[in-house]
Image (spheres, rainbow, N blue to C red):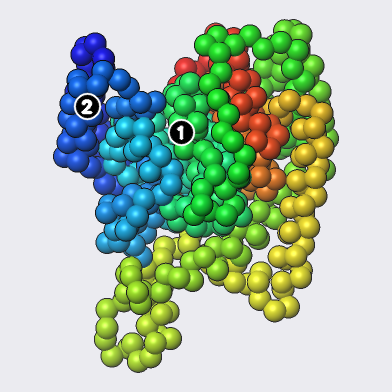
Amino acid sequence: MLTGEITCEQAVSAYLDRIASHAHLNAFIHVYAEEALTRARTIDARIQRERTLKRLTGVVFGIKDVIAYAHHPLTAASRMLKDFRSIYSATAVERLLEEEAIIIGSLNCDEFAMGSSTENSYFGPTLHPLNPDCVPGGSSGGSAAAVSADLCMLALGSDTGGSVRQPADFCGIVGLKPTYGRISRHGLIAYASSFDQIGIFGKNIADVATTLEVIAGPDEFDSTASPLPVEPYQPAINPDVQGLKWAYMQEALDHPSLDREIRSQIEALIDWLIQKGHVVDAVHFHYLDVIAPAYYVLTTAEASANLARYDGMRYGYRAASDDSVSSLDVCYRKTRSEGFGKEVKRRILLGTYVLSEGYYEAYYTKAQQVRRLVAEEAYQILNTYTCLLMPTFPTTAFRLKENINDPVKMYLGDLYTVFANLAGLPAISIPLFRHSNGLPFGVQLVSGRFQEKKLLETAAYLLAHYRSTESFCAG
């Protein structure tokens, strides 16, 4: 940009052209074309005057439509908020803008971030950029599809139980979920407040690391944001990390739901690490089969409370008045029945049930106990090992409508990703493989709390040095 070979305006124009030519993917809910071009011209003029660049000057971002951007639509892909506009920006968005990033639009997702396929959107499903018969994953499927299809350079999503890592895995890109509290949640529509975390999609580790450096850190508007200082997360250009201690869950690789080809490729990666002189040990994790049920009990309970604010009285969708609306109670029920989609209503009902008298101790309290045990065992493993290596998802991207009528199967697919959210750990999915069905898949790395620097270094090491000529997918 300093040389004038390409301007911000030219870059934005190129992305807008690609968005138009890939409209069939339905990755974007709203595109801010004129605004993005105007901002690009303003940045170009400043560069010409000052001959300097900020950390994200001219970098084109998309943001998942659960992240607030002042005076822009904020719908959560729901009928309930289809006409709502945010009155303020999320802290993460403000920090992007301060470093001269350009936000080109808001990205499709599962309604209120509840789903694993981006089929639960009021605005229709997003399609997989490499195979439109398949889903891109969820709930941040629009973010993953947009980055994979080069509709923007990077994207923000949210990860409550894998909603950044799983779509990144499906679409063959990098997806980072930082430690809980590393990025402020101020301006993120709450699904399950003790799990939610803003995450980052990109095509390489360097871009993701720079974005994390910009948006991480304390925030006076979020008491759960960590006060720890932000490290320089940027790994070496060609890292050659030696003598690391890796762990993998034997139960994860032996699980009957795991695709055989995914298992064999991860086992080949483990063998390669051993040949390179790393210590790689199988560890036994005792709670693998109960973490998904515990996760869904806890997150639906929190969702039941968080979504109570959407009643149609102060803002958002309200059911049309007619003779059947004879009381405020009926108005509430009609509004919420019409405004929320099937999956959101399912989770609200489940959450209300587990919080109800007579079931609270049996479900909610028991799930909290499981969460504590999962966290304790995870911390113990990661006190000994640098990284935990595991699958991101049991299969590659599945076909549209394949699992839409089987919510239990969809929930159990989160088997490998909810682990990091229950324990509040940072995790990343990186693209290393291609399946015989032609679709990409990756591997998930999990590290200790606030060990993002080490996590990004190890991810960069694998991307730089591990190559399987039969299966490698560059994303």
- Amino acid type at circle 2 is Arg
Q: Secondary structure at mark 1?
A: helix
Residue that mark 1 sits on: 214
Residue type, numbered disc 1: Val
Per the image, label 2 sits on a secondary structure element best described as: helix
Q: In the depicted view, which residue is nearer to us: 319 or 6?
A: 6
Q: Nearer the viewer, mark 1 or mark 2?
A: 2
Residue 293 image position (x, y, % from top left): 68, 55
Q: Give the number of the disc on residue 287.
A: none
Left or right relative to 275: residue 148: left
Task: Name the quarter where the N terminus is drawn.
Answer: top left
Left of 454 or right of it: where is 9? left
Work out which quarter of the rendered image holds the C terminus and state it: top left
Q: Residue at x 41, y 66 (%)?
A: 340
Residue 150 visible to the viewer: no
Q: Label 1, label 2: how many angstroms apart (C-alpha)?
A: 20 Å
Mark identifier at residue 46: 2
**The image quarter in which residue 20 lies:** top left
> Foreground: 448 or 368?
448
Compared with residue 116, is residue 342 higher up or lower down, i.e. above or below? below
Q: Residue at x 77, y 62 (%)?
A: 366
Viewer-side residue, 280 vs 103: 103
> Is 191 drawn above or below residue 35 in the view shown?
below
Q: How crowded is the residue under tag 2: few (<14 C-alpha within 10 Å), some, or many (20+)?
A: few
